[in-house]
Amino acid sequence: MNKPYIIAEAGVNFYDTAKQRGVTPLEEALHYVDEAKRVGIDAIKFQTYKANTIASKNSPAYWDTTKEVTKTQYELFSKYDHFGEEEYRQLYNYCKKVGIDFLSTPFDYASADYLQNMMDVYKISSSDLSNIPFIRHIAKKGKPIFLSVGAAYLSEVEYAVRVIKEEQCPKIVLMHCVLSYPCAYQNANLNVIKTLRHVFPDITIGYSDHTLPDDTMTVLTAAYLAGAEVIEKHFTLDKSLPGNDHYHAGDPDDFAKAINNFKLIKEIMGTEEKTVLPCEIIPRREARRSLVLTRDMKEGEVITQDDLIAKRPGVGISPAYQEIVVGRCVRKDCKEDTILTWDLV
């Protein structure tokens, strides 16, 4: 069992924490990169969009408006759409410098095109699962695709996968996701990971999480145990901030807990081979039992059932061979509590 590939979905959260710290959004985005790298995250992902190409001006909110009070999608996206190709290029170069993978989810054709030379993998949002022309456009670029499948019927997922395969995409990762912000624990539905693994045995399955971070990051751990090989969660440097994705995001400490869980699970799961491990050799010998005499016996006496008891350690004849030993003679005088070996019978 390999450690999952971990993606920190910074999205556009850095805009808010930049204001809090009194720095520019780009400076804060770079800070997010540093923090993600520090705790061992594999990739940091942003979101690339323009409000006027992602949502109509009267598009209603679908998030918890007690946490994010903005009433339309257009209004919300307008707050966070200021980065362009140059800013993402700087982020990409910095990620490359510090040694963490750069990703950004494109939400329009222009960003999908200019991000092409910055990413080894494309991430497509659940919201674009039915945007088949857009999916096909990205699939034609010949790079692996991570596709979130939240709020979708299985038939829709199958259709999108078929389109991606038609364009000879080299790898697909389907990301189980529940399109609810935040996603209640009872709605996480992690068994869908097993369903996707069964329905798409030739495809890697992952999980994109929208639940509130729990104290021990059990949700992500359970997703890993269910078979998720890629795990993504929203990432913030201040979970107390209202709005956007902060309230259901994990901070660096949360991600560090999850990563430690994954490492521990990988270590404790081991291999599927049932054998005697090196660490068991001495305990196996000392804790198993041998046939031991219950009385003093003279050379030539026949061993009966009552003359034997099984005791530790297991350095003599195993009790498994008791029926063979009964009826044989001892070859020399033996004291009570003698551990029998084959040279004595």
Image (tube, rainbow, N blue to C red):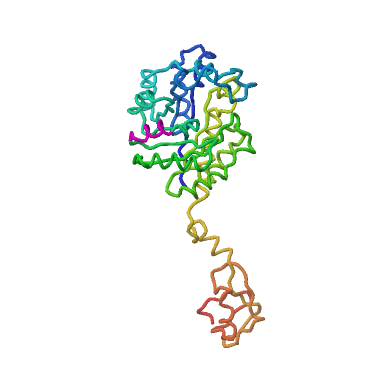
Q: Residue at x 39, y 39 (%)?
A: 164
Is residue 3 at least partly visible in the picture? no
92 to the left or right of 333: left
Q: Main secondary structure of the magenta part?
A: helix
In magenta segment, residue 156: no
| Residue 37: quadrant of the picture | top left
Rendering coords of residue 210 (x, y %)? 56, 32
Residue 261 appears in the picture as rendered: yes
Which residue is situated farthest in the top direction here?
22
Direction from residue 72 to residue 49 in the image, left or right: left
> Residue sitting at 32 percent across and 28 percent down?
117
Q: Is residue 32 above or below residue 321?
A: above
Identify the residue at image location x=62%, y=72%: 310
Q: How many marks?
A: 0
Taking depth in this image into account, of 227 and 4 the one nearest to the observer is 227
| Image position, residue 212 (x, y; %) | 61, 31
Question: Image check: 130 left or right of 312?
Answer: left
Front position in the image: 336 or 107: 107
Where is residue 23 shown, x and y percent of the image? 48, 13
Residue 92, image x, y percentages: 37, 25
209 versus 302 height, above or below: above
**Which quadrant holds the C terminus?**
bottom right
> Residue 134: within the magenta?
yes
Q: Nearer the viewer, residue 235 or 51?
A: 51
Horizontal side of 193 relative to 337 (left or right) equals left
What residue is rendered at 63% in x and 36% in y? 185
Return the residue nearer the eye: 84 or 96.
84
Q: Which picture quadrant has residue 146? A: top left
Part of the protein shown in magenta:
132-141
Against 29, residue 222 (above or below) is below
